[in-house]
Amino acid sequence: MLVSCRIVPSAFGRGIVIPLVKNTDGNIADSSNYRGIDLRPIISKIFECLMMDMVRGKLISSDLQFGFKSNSSCRHAIIALQAGVIDNGGTATLCALDISKAFDRVHFLLIN
């Protein structure tokens, strides 16, 4: 038997999406020149920070993960690549994925 339990109030998932101009020098009549910004209640952000503090010690990732991790950057990944492969006479194949335009493809619903 499955029991439904709501831990987070549904209002925490609600927000107001506002369009924000990416490039003020560009064409402001062009819809691709806008990015949707989601404004959420401050209480939901506080709740998120409290939950992160509770689970931070339990979240474990590889030492070779550099993205989406605090105190880590692309520079750390380059140093690890150089020290582990290139300095030892090896070769490396690199595949880069540019998702900078990924969110331009998301359709946002504006609710007044």
Image: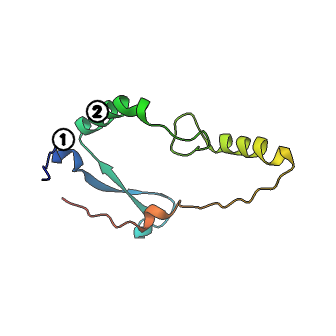
Amino acid marked by disc 2: Ile
| Residue for badge 2 | 46
Question: Toward which corner of the image does residue 28 lie, by quadrant?
Answer: bottom left
40 or 90: nearer the viewer: 90
- What is the secondary structure assignment of the residue under circle 1? loop
82 to the left or right of 30: right
Q: Residue at x 43, y 29 (%)?
A: 57
30 to the left or right of 42: right
41 or 69: nearer the viewer: 69
The relative height of residue 105 versus residue 53 in the rendered view (above or below) is: below
21 to the left or right of 25: left
- Residue 17 in the image, given as x and y percentages of width and height: 29, 55
| Residue for badge 1 | 7
- Residue 70 in the image, given as x and y percentages of width and height: 52, 35
Amino acid marked by disc 1: Ile
The answer to whether mark 1 and mark 2 are in CB contact below 8 A is no
The relative height of residue 103 versus residue 60 in the rendered view (above or below) is: below
Question: Toward which corner of the image does residue 51 lie, by quadrant?
Answer: top left
Q: Residue at x 25, y 62 (%)?
A: 110
The relative height of residue 69 versus residue 37 in the rendered view (above or below) is: above
Rounded to the nearest angstrom, the CA distance separating label 1 from label 2 is: 15 Å
Mark on residue 70?
A: none
- Could you tell me how many numbered marks the image carries? 2
